[in-house]
């Protein structure tokens, strides 16, 4: 799992980082003391788990929760017990740890996170960074996504959205009805009109299929049909 630790107390960050390093299920760890920076990190990266402090100096945990994809597991870590019951109104929240934290209780929370996660998400809405703002995109409306250097272009029927994210980073966030068909293109299977002669036709556009992705595409189509 890729984990983001968000806490304004450096000692808590160090403790959580130490706990994560002792847990085989967590392979990548990113830390931040800022709520605003956490929002930028969440919008530009794919995290499986967020360890989130409720009381931050620049944003509340509740505000950050509203910007986290429901498919991302969140463990609240704070001394604010008042938010404990309310936190479970959020689909992302898997567990709630009250400071001071012991490793045995932390490890139990990680086991809950593992049960919460699924191999692929079918959630149809994602928050995408467009310029200086985050916008909620209904991914069922996205026909295909193309690479443009360090940017990804989301092509919808009526508009195009550019976001500062590589295609690989975008691919990790996408619902399971998307499939990469070329090193520079991912297609929404629900919008495919036809497939012929190594080409896909999507809303009047013709997109080439790379031979290395053709088998994966046909397998995905058979699974979702």
Image (cartoon, helix red, strand yellow):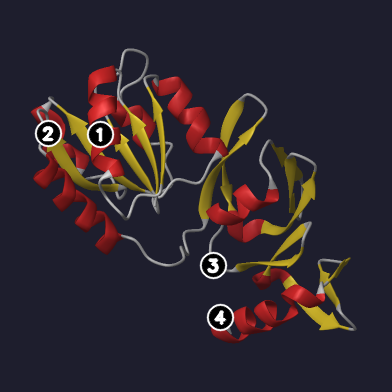
Q: Which residue is mark 1?
A: 16
The tag earlier along the polypeptide, 1 or 2, is 1
Of the two numbered discs 2 and 3 in the rendering, the one whose residue sits closer to the viewer: 2
Of the two numbered discs 2 and 4 in the rendering, the one whose residue sits closer to the viewer: 2
> Is disc 4 placed on a helix, strand or loop?
helix
Between 10 and 70, the one nearer to me in the picture: 10
In three-dimensional space, the C-alpha distance between marks 4 and 1, rounded to whole angstroms, equals: 39 Å
Q: Are marks 1 and 2 in contact (CB under 8 Å)?
A: yes
In three-dimensional space, the C-alpha distance between marks 2 and 4, rounded to whole angstroms, equals: 43 Å
Residue drawn at (51%, 52%) of the image:
125
> Is disc 2 placed on a helix, strand or loop?
loop
Of the two numbered discs 4 and 1 in the rendering, the one whose residue sits closer to the viewer: 1
Q: Which residue is mark 2?
A: 101
Q: Position of residue 174 (x, y in %)?
A: 56, 57
Q: Are marks 4 and 3 in contact (CB under 8 Å)?
A: yes
Crowding near the residue tagged with mark 4, few <14, some 14–19, many ≥20 C-alpha atoms within 10 Å: few
Q: Which residue is mark 4?
A: 224
> Is disc 1 placed on a helix, strand or loop?
helix
In three-dimensional space, the C-alpha distance between marks 1 and 2, rounded to whole angstroms, equals: 9 Å
In three-dimensional space, the C-alpha distance between marks 4 and 3, rounded to whole angstroms, equals: 9 Å
């Amino acid at each position: 799992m890729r984990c983001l630790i968000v806490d304004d107390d450096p000692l808590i960050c160090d403790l959580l980082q130490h706990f994560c390093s002792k847990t085989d299920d967590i392979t990548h760890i990113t830390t931040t003391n800022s709520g605003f920076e956490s929002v930028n990190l969440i919008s530009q990266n794919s995290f499986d788990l967020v360890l989130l402090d409720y009381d931050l100096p620049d944003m509340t945990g509740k505000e950050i929760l509203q910007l986290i994809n429901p498919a991302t597991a969140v463990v609240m870590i704070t001394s604010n017990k008042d938010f404990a019951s309310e936190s479970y109104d959020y689909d992302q929240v898997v567990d709630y740890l009250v400071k001071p934290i012991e490793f045995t209780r932390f490890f139990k929370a990680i086991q809950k996170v593992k049960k919460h996660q699924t191999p692929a998400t079918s959630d149809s809405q994602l928050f995408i960074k467009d310029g200086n703002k985050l916008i909620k995109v209904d991914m069922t409306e996205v026909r295909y996504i193309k690479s443009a250097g360090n940017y990804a272009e989301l092509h919808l029927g009526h508009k195009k959205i550019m976001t500062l994210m590589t295609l690989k980073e975008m691919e990790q966030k996408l619902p399971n009805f998307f499939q990469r068909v070329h090193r520079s293109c991912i297609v929404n299977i629900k919008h495919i009109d036809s497939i012929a002669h190594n080409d896909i036709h999507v809303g009047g556009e013709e997109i080439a299929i790379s031979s290395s992705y053709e088998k994966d595409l046909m397998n995905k189509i058979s699974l979702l049909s």
